[in-house]
């Protein structure tokens, strides 16, 4: 309850600041990972619900070209994707799906690769279409694919905040460091946050973060921000099986509480001062 109150205050402070500065652009969070199977999409979906419950207007973009399972985690079926936009049969706003809990979903998934290869005029239409409704949202969450392909990095480089998800698995940590290194080489002022999933306990999460942060400080001259950790818990597995986010299936469980904490931490963390494109899809086209 304390976290929900704090989250609501953050929302009001942010909106008041936006009125003063005249900002109409949503803040973009890219949830990404160096390796698949780390729980990235599950975190994205549940953070969207936390944000919506706190009063944020949320758009969740499923940009995972490999798995694209946001709809499965939410237990919904999407009729259209960006593929239909590229074909010219739908515009971008038409494919957005509102799900219970006041979260909007924009299905992209396998169409992301086609999006990056589309003709210039078509991409300009998408940029213009997004510009017309982006001010309807406070936060745009992008669930990227895993890895460092151009399809992933184009969204990551366009975001205000990059949330890198990893597990204690050595391969996952190595790939997460690789992702962080690429972000910092291309966007040295980026806000990069680390979330550790499937840890045995909070101490393990803190220890892993400390080691990772020492590496980034030494070799990249950058201090990571620790967003938090999520313990390994069979309740998450059960929630996925019944196609219901853990925030709805087990709202008082330790994983749900951890995700609320992580979301609040990301909200209160300042974004980098480096300028970003005024339009997410403009940035995707640029990078």
Image: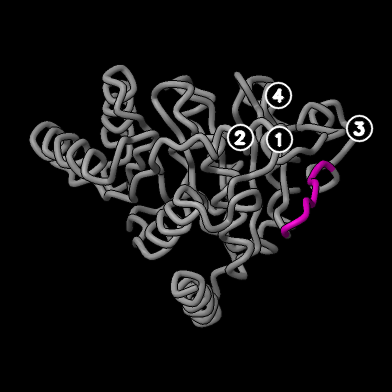
Q: Distance between the Cα atoms at labels 4 and 3?
A: 14 Å
Q: Is residue 98 magenta?
A: yes
Report the front residue among 48 and 60.
Answer: 48
Distance of mark 2 from mark 1, alpha carbons? 6 Å
Which x, y percent locates residue 83?
79, 26
The colour mode here is one colour
As drawn, 38 above or below 202: above
- Element on which disc 3 rests: loop
Q: Could you give the CA–CA distance between mark 3 and mark 2, rounded to whole angstroms?
A: 38 Å
For the record, the magenta segment spans: 95-101
Look at mark 1 in the image and give the residue it sits on: 242
Of label 2 and label 4, which has the lower sequence position? 4
- SS assignment at label 2: helix
Residue 183 in sight here: yes
Q: Which mark is residue 111?
A: 4
Q: Which residue is mark 3?
A: 89
């Amino acid at each position: 309850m304390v976290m929900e109150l704090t989250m609501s205050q953050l929302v009001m402070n942010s909106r008041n600041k936006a009125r003063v500065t005249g900002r109409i652009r949503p803040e973009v969070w890219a949830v990404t990972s160096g390796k698949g199977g780390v729980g990235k999409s599950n975190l994205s979906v549940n953070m969207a619900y936390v944000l919506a419950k706190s009063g944020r207007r949320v758009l969740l973009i499923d940009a995972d070209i490999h798995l694209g399972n946001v709809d499965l985690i939410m237990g919904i079926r999407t009729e259209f994707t960006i593929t239909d936009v590229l074909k010219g049969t739908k515009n971008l706003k038409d494919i957005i799906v509102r799900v219970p809990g006041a979260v909007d979903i924009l299905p992209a998934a396998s169409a992301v690769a086609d999006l990056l290869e589309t003709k210039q005029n078509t991409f300009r239409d998408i940029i213009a279409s997004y510009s017309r409704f982006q001010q309807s949202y406070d936060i745009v969450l992008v669930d990227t694919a895993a890895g460092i392909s151009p399809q992933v990095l184009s969204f990551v480089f366009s975001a205000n905040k990059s949330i890198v998800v990893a597990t204690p698995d050595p391969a996952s940590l190595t790939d997460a460091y690789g992702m962080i290194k690429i972000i910092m080489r291309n966007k040295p002022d980026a806000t990069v946050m680390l979330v550790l999933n499937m840890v045995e306990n909070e101490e393990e999460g803190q220890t892993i973060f400390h080691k990772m942060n020492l590496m980034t400080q030494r070799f990249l001259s950058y201090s990571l921000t620790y967003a938090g950790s999520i313990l390994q818990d069979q309740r998450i597995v059960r929630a996925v099986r019944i196609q219901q986010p853990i925030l709805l299936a087990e709202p008082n469980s330790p994983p749900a509480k951890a995700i609320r904490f992580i979301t609040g931490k990301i909200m209160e963390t300042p974004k980098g001062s480096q300028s970003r494109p005024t339009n997410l899809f403009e940035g995707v086209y640029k990078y």
